[in-house]
Amino acid sequence: MIEEIMRKYKERTKKDCYKIEIEEDVAPDIMDDKIGGIPYLPIGEEYPLDKNGNPMILLVQVDLKDIKLEGYPEKGILEIFIDRECSWPCDYAVKYFEQVADYRKDLAELNLNNGIYKKPLKIKLVKDVEHMPLSDYRFFDVMSEVVKEVANIEINNLSDLEDLFFENDSDIFEEMLDINIFPGNLAGYADFTQEDPRPLKDNGEKMECLIKIDSNLKHGIMIGDSGIIFSFITAEDIESGSFENAIVDWDCC
């Protein structure tokens, strides 16, 4: 029964996305997909500043020309900037340049100070499928529906779900470790060290995860205290290329 529940849960929540893979020992060029480094900025484009007038650091840059996802444009460069201290709530700016043009060559790499990465990292985006993590606020509703379909059992809370798995010689938390949850993605699921903020904030309509980046000690990425940074956006803004309407937030242990 548990095997069938998990199979159906994975099928129900699978989502096409691109996982972020870090390319080892390769310094990124200005036009590369990357975490950190010198951003692509068209000539005449002002560098984004935080609320104190200080230059923000580039969190991530992605060229969408090779991205094949329903609703996403297949051209243009998407960038997210964040304040160097990774304050909370953070200062951020989301930029999207639909047409790639001549770019500024007067920009220098910033001193990171307390930045969230030690050095710029070239990344590769690989198409894959991700599943809804347990931290997603929709998890219990989806899983309870699946349990009802498979076993005709009503579960009313997480404790009931844990008991059901335990009674069948399994553990829901261990089972959830066996689903696809990537440490970084474009258009996958957000993940959280604490709780999903979407139902708690005024931006509840921004349901789609644009970008997620998890802390990664191996590659020198540290978001607060082993936290996760994520960006939310509406499906309508993705389709219209209005990425500047995305919000950026993070949490940590």
Image (cartoon, helix red, strand yellow):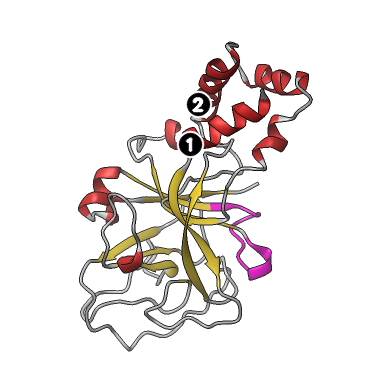
Q: Is residue 192 magenta?
A: no
Q: Amino acid at mark 1?
A: Thr
Give percent across and percent down for residue 34: 46, 72
* Residue drawn at x 43%, y 36% as measured from the top left: 198
Q: CA distance from mark 2 to mark 1?
A: 8 Å
Which sits in the foreground, 184 or 56?
A: 184
Which range of residues does the magenta coloring cover?
216-228
Q: Is residue 225 magenta?
A: yes
Does residue 94 appear to the left or right of 60 in the view shown?
A: left
**For the residue labelled by badge 1, is the local secondary structure a helix, a strand or a loop?**
helix
In the rendered view, tell whether residue 128 sits above or below residue 34: above
The outermost residue toward the bottom is 106
Give percent across and percent down for residue 170: 75, 28
Q: Which mark is residue 68?
A: none
Asked whether residue 155 appears in the rendered view, the answer is no
**For the residue labelled by badge 2, is the local secondary structure a helix, a strand or a loop?**
helix
Asked if labels 1 and 2 touch by Cβ distance under 8 angstroms, the answer is yes
* Residue drawn at x 43%, y 83% as measured from the top left: 29
Q: Amino acid at mark 2?
A: Val
Neighbour tally class for label 1: few under 14, some 14-19, many 20 plus, Cα within 10 Å? some
Disc 1: which residue = 13
